[in-house]
Amino acid sequence: MSKRLPHLFALTLTLSAASIALAADQEAGRRKAEAVCAACHGANGISVSDTIPNLAGQKPRYLETQLAALKDGRRKSEIMNPIAGQLSAADIADVAAHFAGQPGAVSTAKSAMLPNLVKSSVSFPEGYQGTYTKYHTINFPATKQVRHYLANPTAVQAAKAGQPMPNGAMLFVEVYSARLDADQKPVLGADGFFVADKLLFYTSMARDAGWGKDIPEILRNDEWNYAVFTTGKQQRAGVNQAECLACHKPLDKVSYLFTLKQLTDAAKSRY
Ligand code: HEC
Ligand code: HEC
């Protein structure tokens, strides 16, 4: 009997070593959460907006299975797929342990956005109409909007030369409501696009040296920053660049642009 005791003792030691390792993982999960997930879910798992779920106090196993499904694409989310895709199995276990360990909150609670992701270096391109090239238009039937896509000369030159977008490039989108007919249906112009009615706002992306440095690697789009501008030419407050960055992130092979092909075709045919 006494011969077996040391053996049991060794087993106990192994188990407590395992729980120490688990605690360390939760700490790694906290660091990852603070640097990346906090931009949307809050470091404590209480999210920053009504369109983003809380993770605080969620079952760890549920968090892990969702992250695994978001990583391999069985669960679709334009924002979460690129983020989960960059997490290792160990990262997933770590962040799940972290968020599961956070206290829940009432549904109206909100975390603040991360200042480094709210801050955008993009400024309004005063007088852009004189120098920018309009290269694309898209109808948005669901929202009864039409968007006009413009590029500055730096972006047009790079596209024409088949080069990646360099620092100084800017893409700028005018978002209009569509003119509606008596049945509240968008009126089509001769070009097949909705006739623009009122300018609603602008969205933009631009890059310059050092603009990516405060953005965590999982979200960073090289040196690109994003901004939304009001018709009064001011940056719209409360825009979470983390969402722009996450959705454009998979496009690293095409300078993070969804419309690079359209820009390239326009640049080559017109100049
Ligand atoms: C840019 C914003 C953003 C960032 C950053 C972000 N998430 Fe998400 N996350 C979302 C959104 C939006 C959803 C809802 C996705 C959907 O509609 O299916 C979501 C969903 C989830 C879910 C599923 C929740 C559920 O209730 O099913 C998990 C788990 C999750 N995120 C974990 C993480 C982790 C871990 C990180 C950091 C590594 C992270 N997220 C970073 C925006 C973000
Ligand atoms: C859910 C995915 C998604 C999110 C989030 C997103 N974008 Fe985009 N973005 C797109 C798609 C798709 C296009 C292609 C044209 C379109 O649908 O307008 C696009 C196009 C653009 C363009 C034109 C240049 C290009 O890439 O083709 C700009 C500028 C832009 N987005 C800015 C923003 C800004 C600013 C934000 C954040 C406030 C943002 N985007 C968030 C998906 C997204």
Image: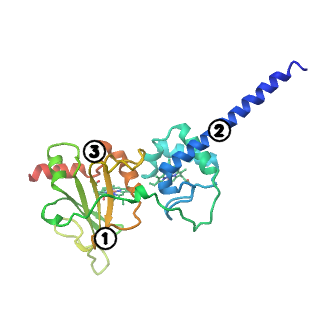
Which amino acid is tagged 2?
Leu
Crowdedness near tag 1: few (<14), some (14–19) or many (≥20) residues, C-alpha within 10 Å: some
* Cα distance in 3D space between marks 1 and 3: 28 Å
Q: Residue at x 27, y 78 (%)?
A: 181
Q: Nearer the viewer, residue 142 or 69?
A: 69
Q: Nearer the viewer, residue 31 or 50?
A: 31
Q: x and y percent of residue 45 in the render?
A: 57, 55
> Are dots 3 and 2 in contact, CB under 8 Å?
no
Q: x and y percent of residue 41 in the render?
A: 52, 56
Which amino acid is tagged 1?
Thr
Quarter of the image where ligand 2 sits? bottom left
* Some atom of ligand 1 lies within 8 Å of the CB belonging to the residue at label 2: no
The quadrant of the picture occupied by the N terminus is top right
Q: Residue at x 64, y 50 (%)?
A: 101
**Quadrant in which residue 253 is drawn:** top left
Q: Which mark is residue 14?
A: none
The color scheme shown is: rainbow
Crowdedness near tag 2: few (<14), some (14–19) or many (≥20) residues, C-alpha within 10 Å: some
Left or right of 148, for residue 239:
right
Q: Residue furthest left?
A: 271
| Residue under numbered circle 2 | 22
Decide: is 89 above or below 233: above
Left or right of 88, for residue 138:
left
Decide: is 59 above or below 127: above
* Cα distance in 3D space between marks 2 and 1: 48 Å
Q: Which mark is residue 254?
A: 3
| Residue under numbered circle 1 | 230
Decide: is 93 above or below 202: above
